[in-house]
Image (cartoon, grey):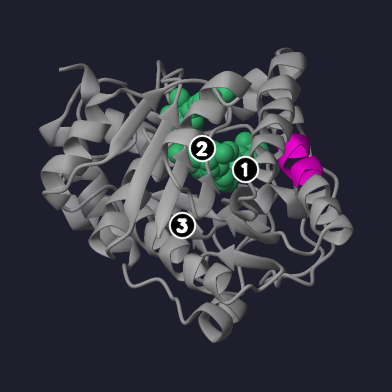
Amino acid sequence: MKILVTGGAGFIGSHTCVELMNAGHEVVVIDNLCNSSEKSMERVKEITGKDLAFYKGDILDRDCLNTIFTEHKIDAVIHFAGLKAVGESVYKPWEYYNNNITGTLTLTDVMRAHDVKNLIFSSSATVYGDPAEIPITENCPKGKCTNPYGWTKSMLEQILTDLHTADNSWNVILLRYFNPIGAHPTGLMGEDPNGIPNNLMPYITQVAIGKLPELGIFGNDYDTPDGTCIRDYIHVCDLATGHVAALKKIEEKAGLCIYNLGTGVGYSVLDVVNNFMEATGVNVAYSMKPRREGDVPQCYSSAQKAKEELGWEAKYGIKEMCRDSWNWQTKNPNGYKD
Ligand code: NAD
Ligand code: UD1
């Protein structure tokens, strides 16, 4: 199939391009590079030994999208493009709603004008809010999001569902990611956050390499075995193959489907730090800090539905996730900026 990957230069998008191309699909990427580097596209080509088409453009730019759909016979779209910094979304809500929601409305409008109605959308476990059940199945009701970023995901799920209800020639797969970490095992691609990282794993690797003095662990008084929060960390390459599996479902004309992409296993913050130190032999200094606003104590998936219906499950364990994050960090201390 020929796949348009929006946001394909980003962390998850670039890893997904590799898996798509390795599975024999052709890839066209649109990315405005607002949170990524075109170098990731070179790395995709280096890893796969294959070429892809790259458009530096914005999903809000209807003309650019029309050009792409005219120049390529696209079979399906995998839609990663979006702003994703939780804290920033609180003080820039308009920018988040405009980019993520207007961007997706523009994209889907151009898609239907070109009669391309196959879409895989990057959603997030954040739509469950403080989850009503653990492990979280797809039947768990959506919850109250704690920030505008989360609301864009929740609202877009609704918008895409309504689109399918009104016109069931749409095939829409909503993928709810848990916590992607790790990097390509070659060390050629990985997560390249701007400034001081907000997320746990890039913070750990930057402490380990000496760029940051210590990790603050946000809260050790939660109702969990060691008092720190529990999450479902998933290797980004596993997440990427989840999209290849979802494409097969699209080919079966599946209608609207929702899947969690997680491992089904929860690790606490302290578990991650300890696994990182064991996997790499590198010490990570840390101290306990107050809770971070908006954090939920536990969030991990039931990965059953994706296993049964997509034939997909995560293969990498927590030590491999730590090893590959560290491999990327040590080989690219300044990310793609070197
Ligand atoms: P990322 O920032 O690395 O990738 C997103 C890409 O989209 C970037 O390359 C950025 O330049 C591009 N982009 C943003 N707005 C655009 C626009 N208007 N037009 C064109 N390109 C645009 O983020 P990621 O971690 O790879 O996440 C990919 C998707 O998955 C996002 O939608 C994100 O919200 C979602 N998601 C991520 C996580 C996570 O932990 N990383 C978890 C759940 C969901
Ligand atoms: C966060 C977002 C979520 C988003 C996801 C991926 C919030 C509330 N949620 O998830 O919407 O989809 O990122 O971008 O922000 N931690 C520390 N110290 C740190 C950093 C993190 O102790 O310096 C802890 C956090 O409290 C949390 C865990 O590590 O318990 C994971 O944090 P993080 O990587 O930010 O992911 P989430 O909060 O799960």
On the image, which quarter does residue 165 sit in? bottom right
- In contact (CB < 8 Å): disc 2 and disc 3: no
Report the number of numbered marks: 3
Q: How dense is the environment of label 1, judged by Cα within 10 Å: few (below 14), some, or many (20 and up)?
A: some
**If you read the primary sequence from the N terminus, does the residue marked by circle 2 or circle 1 appear first?**
2
Q: Is 152 inside the magenta-drawn segment?
A: yes
Q: Label 3: which residue?
A: 233
**What is the x, y in percent for residue 25?**
33, 59
**If you read the primary sequence from the N terminus, does the residue marked by circle 2 or circle 3 appear first?**
2
**Secondary structure of residue under mark 3:** strand
Three-letter amino acid code at disc 1? His
**What is the x, y in percent for residue 259?**
63, 67
**If you read the primary sequence from the N terminus, does the residue marked by circle 3 or circle 1 appear first?**
1
Three-letter amino acid code at disc 2? Phe
Point out the image quarter for the C terminus. top left
Q: Residue at x 53, y 34 (%)?
A: 81
Question: Mark 2 near ligand 1 (CB under 8 Å)?
Answer: no
Q: Label 1: which residue?
A: 114
Q: Main secondary structure of the magenta part?
A: helix
**What is the x, y in percent for residue 294?**
73, 37
Which circle marks residue 69 in the picture? 2
Q: Residue at x 44, y 27 (%)?
A: 31
Q: For the magenta stretch, what is the residue range?
A: 150-156
**Secondary structure of residue under mark 2:** helix
Against 186, residue 64 (above or below) is above
Please give left or right for residue 88 compared with residue 310 in the image: right
- In contact (CB < 8 Å): disc 2 and disc 1: yes
